[in-house]
Amino acid sequence: MWKNKFIEYLRFEKNYSSHTEISYLNDLNQFEKFIVDKCGEFDLQKIDSDLIRIWIMQLMEEGMKPRSVNRKLSAVKSFFKYLKKQGVVTHNPAERVNGPKVNKKLPVFVSNKDMEKILDDDENFSDDFEGHRDRFIIELFYVTGMRRSELIGLKDSDIDFYNKTLRVTGKRNKQRIIPLSDITMEKLKGYMQKRDEHIKNKSPFLFVRNNGEPMCPIMVYKIVNTHLSSIATLSKKSPHVLRHSFATEMLNNGAEINAVKELLGHSSLASTEIYTHVTFDELKRVYNNAHPRAKNEGEK
């Protein structure tokens, strides 16, 4: 009875899709079957957190993936939250039950060697305005780690030539200052000179199209994707890959993780910590290749 009322609640009050309703109902039916097999009845008052944990363990032992288990646990948590709201139970036994950890995929990044091949080969870029712009867009992504939306939103007024910095506006309009090297500043000035010679109608935006209008997201994506496509081993070829590459290079070269966090504009250190796994993998690779005692017998 309460299961059906819960599904109606999801449909009419939460506006969940029919697909989500079916998933929740299947998860709750599976949970009910487990409880009946274990206890002989599905008594909502007798279900406690230990029973729910045993159910989760059984799902894991059956080979279910952590992401699927967490989805089922989420359904049970939502169900008991609804029951508590309706006064059917006095507490939610699933509230403090933690699901299995889901392994995060490590971010894809480009090595500095591959980036040098792309940026330093003049044949990769035309010698006109678009060629200079596209090269500098890729380089700025790589040396600052900024997001695509942040790069598109850059204006000439965000540049501090005296202090050699960029003011970047990130998520929720939060601003941060990114320092630029002397070399990058010179390349920035060179690009701006080329842009001003080519574009007749002045725009406040740093990066523009041939007609002087601001860049659009898909255009920036295509520029990066086209040039990263020369790296055959790269599984992803987007501006975000260059953001990953920036963070990885910074940490590999001894930067403090808190400094990288600020440069990336992360609100939480947890978002930056994933790059430490990448650098640790790189450290292991270097060790295995360089240390004589780390090599296999056949390699000695």
Image (cartoon, rainbow, N blue to C red):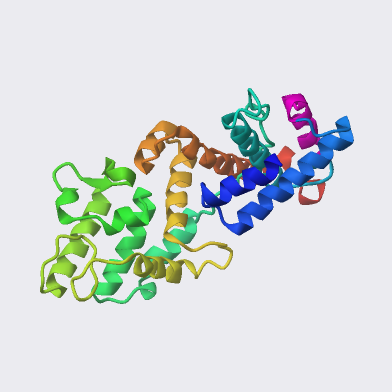
Q: Residue at x 60, y 29 (%)?
A: 84
Q: Is residue 38 above or below residue 226?
A: above
Left or right: 226, with 187 as reference point: right
Residue 162 location, quadrant: top left
Q: Is residue 36 above or below residue 122?
A: above
Q: Main secondary structure of the magenta part?
A: helix
Residue 72 location, quadrant: top right
Numbered circles on residues, count:
0
Q: Is residue 94 above or below residue 176?
A: above
Residue that sits furthest to the front in the current view: 1
Assign the N terminus to one quadrant of the image.
top right
Find residue 246 and report its horizontal and vertical position in percent: 42, 49
Find residue 89 and report its horizontal and vertical position in percent: 66, 26
Confirm whether the magenta stretch covers residue 266.
no
Left or right: 52, with 92 as reference point: right
Front one among 110 and 117: 110
Find residue 23 and report its horizontal and vertical position in percent: 68, 52
Front one among 188 and 173: 173
Q: Is residue 103 visible?
A: no
Q: Residue at x 59, y 40 (%)?
A: 283
Q: Residue at x 28, y 59 (%)?
A: 152
Q: Residue at x 85, y 36 (%)?
A: 36
Left or right: 202, with 226 as reference point: left
Residue that sits furthest to the top in the current view: 90
Q: Is residue 230 visible?
A: yes
Find residue 40 and report its horizontal and vertical position in percent: 89, 32
Confirm whether the magenta stretch covers residue 46.
yes
Q: The magenta stretch spans which residues?
A: 44-58
